[in-house]
Image (cartoon, grey):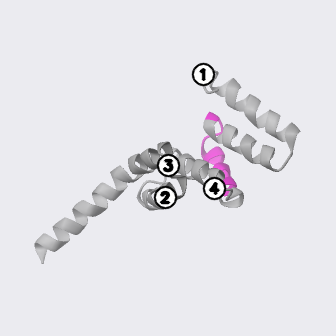
């Protein structure tokens, strides 16, 4: 029984740390839908802005804009200078054909991190 608990503990640890890496690998392989689940799991144990952004980016790629926007707003509430979140919000505005808002967010992303684009 103790060995089983140890194995379960180790699996949770691996999911926490490998989830975002696995998701990034899946995204690079253009298997974006498969990246979402590991990121959701990772977010449960690591609610960092980095994991939130990775999930929001994947959701945008799958046209799940409302859920992505909620994550982006959460990121920017905690860290207003998070350039990638501004970029992601700009992408959502582009999808909505709100071009002036898109330009504002994309300019904010570049202003905050000139190397970003």
Q: Which mark is residue 115?
A: 1
Up the image or down, 39 lies above or below 107; here it is below
Q: Which mark is residue 62?
A: 4
Residue that badge 3 annotates: 51
**Mark 1 and mark 3 in contact (Cβ < 8 Å)?**
no
Residue that badge 2 annotates: 34
Q: In this image, 65 relative to 46: left or right?
A: right
Question: Which quadrant of the figure contains the N terminus?
Answer: bottom left
Question: Which quadrant of the figure contains the C terminus?
Answer: top right
> Which of the two residues, 93 or 86, is positioned nearer the viewer here?
93
Q: Earlier in the sequence, mark 4 or mark 3?
A: 3
Which residue range is magenta in the image?
68-83
Quadrant in the picture for residue 76: top right
Predominant secondary structure in magenta?
Answer: helix
Which of pointers 2 and 1 indicates the residue nearer the eye?
Answer: 2
Q: Earlier in the sequence, mark 2 or mark 1?
A: 2
Q: Is residue 74 magenta?
A: yes
Q: Estimate how packed mark 2 is, as few (under 14), some (14 to 19) or many (20 or more) residues with alpha carbons within 10 Å.
A: some
> Which of the two residues, 58 or 74, is positioned nearer the viewer here?
58
């Amino acid at each position: 029984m103790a060995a089983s608990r140890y194995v379960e503990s180790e699996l949770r640890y691996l999911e926490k740390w490998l989830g975002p890496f696995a998701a990034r690998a899946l995204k690079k392989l253009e298997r974006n839908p498969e990246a979402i689940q590991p990121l959701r799991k990772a977010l449960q144990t690591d609610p960092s802005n980095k994991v939130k952004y990775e999930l929001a980016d994947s959701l945008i790629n799958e046209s799940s804009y409302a859920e992505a926007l909620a994550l982006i707003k959460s990121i920017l509430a905690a860290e207003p200078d998070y350039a990638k979140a501004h970029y992601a919000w700009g992408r959502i505005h582009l999808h909505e054909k709100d071009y002036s808002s898109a330009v504002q967010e994309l300019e904010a992303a570049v202003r905050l991190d000139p190397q970003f684009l």
